[in-house]
Every structure is written in C-alpha cells, then in structure tokens.
Amino acid sequence: MLPFQDIIKGRGAQINTVNVFAQQIPVKEHWEAIDEIEQEQAPTKYIEVFPKTIVNKVDSPDVGMEYSMNPYQGCEHGCVYCYARNSHQYWGYNAGLEFEQMVLVKKNAPQLLEKLFQKPNWEVKPIMMSGNTDCYQPVERKLQITRKCLEVFDKYKHPVGIITKNSLVQRDIDILQSLNEHKLTSVCMSINTLNEELRMKLEPRTATIKKRIEMVELLAKNGIPVYVLMAPIIPGLNNHEVMQLAKAVSEAGAKGFGHIVVRLNGSIAEIFANWIETAFPEKAKKVLNQVAALHGGKLNDSRFSTRMKGDGKLAESIASMVKLAKNKYFPEPFNQTLNCQAFIRNNPKGQLTLF
C-alpha cells in the first residue's frame, strides 16, 4: 500500500502492471544499477495512430450493441475498474498507469466512417460510440474527433448511440438535436455514485456528479433521449446508493435506468486490489470478498450469462433493489430502438439516394 504522500493524484491506477503480451520488460539504466522504469507524475501523451477501419463488429451477446467505434484508445478519465484497460495491452502498453497516460488518437476516424457509409453493401445498424473508451474524454475538447464523426452520422442520417461520463457532450447538442429529428440517437450517461469524494478517487478525471446530472437534465430538456447506467455497482462502496441515485436522475429527466456489477478480469484485478488497499484500506478486504461473491468466488468473470449482473444472493439483492428503483421512478419502459430507415448514401455521382 502506498503512503498517502506517494499517491499519484489525478490517476486511478497507482501501478503499472506487466503487459501479458510483452516479451521484454523495459528498464531505465542508472550508473549504480539497472532498475525498472520509475513511476513518475508524467503528463498524458497523445499518440496518433492510423487504423484502416474504425467500426468494430461486437460479437459478445450481452452488451446490447452490434457495432461500436472508439476515436481513442486508452482513457485519461482513469476509472480504476475499467474493463477496457486490458485491451491497451494489444497496443504494447500496460493496463495500469499507461492506459491513462498513453492515449492513442484516431484523427482519421471521420474519414474512415464516411468511407464505410459509402460502401454499397453496408447494412445499417446502430453504432455505439464509446464501446470501449469514452469518446468525450478530455482531449476531445481540443481534437473534436467525436464531433466530426457525429457530423458524418448526421450527414448520412445514420443511427448512433453514445455512452459517456463527460459533460463535454453538451457541446454537440446541436448535432444531437438534428439526429434526434429522425430518431437517430440516444445518450447513455454513466453515473455510479452521488458521493463526489468517492467519484474523485474512483474516476479521477471524469466530470463531477453534479455536472453529469446537469447533462441529463440538459439533454432531456432538449428532447434527446437519455438513459442512466449505474456502472459498475461495487458492493461495499456504492451498492447502497441505488434508490437515491435512481431518484436523482429520474427527477433530472432520464428516460431509463440500468446497472452493471463490477468484474475484475485480467490485470484489472491487480490494479483494483492495489487501489482499494490504498484508497480505502479499512474496506479493502470486505469489498474484494463481496466482488468475488458476485462471480462464483472469483474476482473475474467471463461468462456471458452472468458477467454483467453477477450471480448468487448478493447479485440477486442488487438486482432486486434496481428493479424496485425502476418500478418506482421509471414506470414507463424506455425504448432505445433507433431508426435504421432514414439512411442516405452519397453515391459516386454525387446524387443523394434514399437507402
């Protein structure tokens, strides 16, 4: 456990884990010896990459989307529990601090998206922005890749969903309103606590809880369907907030409410265990035991049937509380079906054809 004065402020992960795909471990040479690279309060680095495609087919049957796209890999938000951390290893970085400090940016994403929509065989299905990392993370304010992608969606009248924890979504309300005229968009705001002190430790560079609830209210006032996902629920930290949080977002105008329980696959288990022992040492053992109780005694869970909601008595208790909250504060079911019939393909001759 790190002494208080050594906590890396503004970061979720407090360690760099070993990349499971790496064949070598980098070192920093000193005159007196060779040591592993030192952890330092380094600024975030933004590295441009040049993918050949931007939309991914989602094969997992329990995530509620067929296609996703991510303008960024790695995420400066630093959510300590983030399942996307493991994917950063495919790019040669680790799932710990490097996930937050080495952000890969795809500036050619709008061009790749338009190229996809130009294909005669493209079958229109909703695409989710932020299927892996947040499309509104801090650097988006400067680069505007997400906004440019939304302009492409609007141009072709293609359905798009958004998941975010950032208030920057308010910048693009003009495009979202245009999309919504044809029922082409909805926004999922991820909020898992009303406790700002917990938020600052758990998700250090996300928008404040107050800001996120204000975004729910703003989107709702502008007629844009907005759904709140309490994700993840971490027993011993935020599971007692279900009713209070559901009430708050319902009053703000959210149309629906759902939940996902925490699961700590791969390197995330090491990162989270280190974090909880640093941030909440008095709760660490209890929290880790309860997380394991959600997943058959293990911190990780890859079972499609249970990984999102967990199983066992604790999972049933959480699900019952969420059901009660939905019945009380969200009596009308939220239909997230987006319009796939308005798509317009710009053919090579420059003529607009209704698809």
Image (spheres, rainbow, N blue to C red):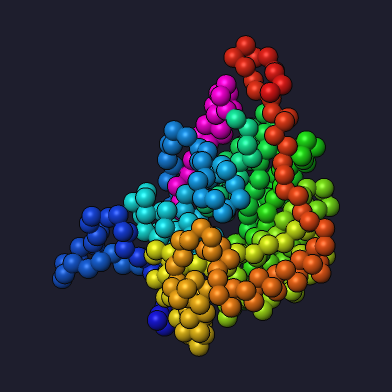
Q: x%, y% of residue 190?
A: 65, 60
Q: Is residue 66 above or below residue 254?
A: above
Q: x%, y% of residue 24?
A: 22, 56
> Is residue 161 toward the left or the right of residue 214 in the image?
left
Q: Quadrant of the N terminus?
A: bottom left
Does the stretch in magenta take in 105?
A: yes
Residue in the picture at 25% in, 59% down = 26
Asked whether 69 or 319 is in front, the reply is 319
Q: Quadrant of the C terminus?
A: top right
Q: Is residue 71 among what the camera can see?
A: no
Q: x%, y% of residue 307?
A: 52, 63
Does the stretch in magenta take in 213?
A: no
Farthest residue toward the bottom?
Answer: 282
Q: Which residues are magenta?
A: 101-122
Residue in the picture at 82% in, 48% down = 222
Asked whether 38 or 64 is in front, the reply is 64
> Is residue 24 toward the left or the right of residue 354 in the image?
left
Q: Is residue 118 among what the camera can see?
A: yes
Q: x%, y% of residue 317?
A: 64, 77
Residue in the picture at 31% in, 67% down = 38
- The tally of labels here is 0
